[in-house]
Image: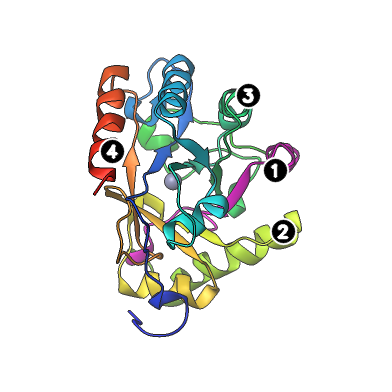
Amino acid sequence: MATRGGPAGQVAAPARPVPILTYHNIGEAPPGATHRGLYLGLDKFRRQLEMLARRGYRGVSMDEGLPYLRGEQRGQVAIVTFDDGYRDNLELALPALREHGFSATCYLVAERIGGYNAWDSELLGVRKPLMDLAGIREWLAAGMRIGSHTLTHPHLPQIEPAQMQREVAVSKSVLEQRLGIAVDHFCFPYGDHDAACVAAAAEAGYRTAVTTERGRVRAGRSLLALPRVGNNGRRSGAAFLARTLLWGLSGSR
Ligand SMILES: [Zn+2]
């Protein structure tokens, strides 16, 4: 991995650790669905947003959160991210986010827009509808942002290097062309990444890339391999509150 010059060399320098929250589906898991932890009921999601707001956190997109990650801006923010681009993000999460004046980033699978989760539908036993282009435009018009989650959602370290680079770079240009906006943020499918994948994200020109490694972002972290905080349906409201209280304590360091 490059350590000097260029985006790969950029590291986080936040004044206080920044949580990046991870969500997938908002809503109840359909009957028969496995991996139910990928779902968070709307009530629970709303309670989490309320707790954040009450604790003084503002939920922000990756674009809005970047100056905080870099240490250029100070304040209590939680970056809100959604993986895969499900329709329920638009229909259920968006109104709840707007109630609090929060924004969020949704990572889209560029060749699956308007389709379903073809990469894991058999494993999960359910086809989950993804936002179509009109839905994504609605998401953006409401002040939300997007990032890339590759073309087809592969395990990047397991595919041919040229194909891996294409998934990382071409997904960015496809989304930029189809939506007419800059796409500066990337999310590794399944959190899978290695040094070559991080270098590919740098080469493609992304400013940040997120993983599924757990934790808040502390100073010295590469902006192209950022840890996140999971918020799946198994975590109770009390556990989420306890976590945000702990953030307050360690945030004072
Ligand atoms: Zn994903």
- Please say if the residues under marks 2 and 1 sit with CB atoms less than 8 Å apart: yes
* Residue kind at label 1, given as amino acid type: Leu
Q: Nearer the viewer, residue 163 or 175?
A: 175
- Of labels 1 and 4, the one closer to you: 4
Which mark is drawn over residue 140? 1
Mark 2 or mark 3, earlier in chain? 3
Say few, some or many: other residues with alpha carbon within 10 Å of mark 1 (under 14 / 14 to 19 / 20 or more).
some
**Residue 147 spot, x, y in % from top left:** 56, 53
Q: Which residue corresponds to mark 4?
A: 247
- Of labels 2 and 4, the one closer to you: 4
Residue 115 left/right relative to 60: right
What is the CA distance from the residue labelled 4 to the residue labelled 3?
26 Å
**Residue 117 can be seen in this image:** no
Question: Would residue 63 be counted in the magenta stretch?
Answer: no
Q: Nearer the viewer, residue 136 or 33?
A: 136
Disc 3 Cβ-to-ligand 1 distance below 8 Å: no
Q: Which residue corresponds to mark 2?
A: 181
What is the CA distance from the residue labelled 2 to the residue labelled 1?
10 Å
Q: Residue at the spot x=37%, y=18% of the render?
A: 32
**Residue 72 spot, x, y in % from top left:** 48, 62
- Please say if the residues under marks 2 and 4 sit with CB atoms less than 8 Å apart: no
Q: Nearer the viewer, residue 38 or 49?
A: 49
* Residue kind at label 2, given as amino acid type: Ile
Q: Nearer the viewer, residue 118 or 174?
A: 174
Range drawn in magenta: 133-157
- Callout 4: SS: helix
Residue 245 left/right relative to 178: left
- Callout 3: SS: helix
Mark 4 or mark 3, earlier in chain? 3
- Callout 2: SS: loop
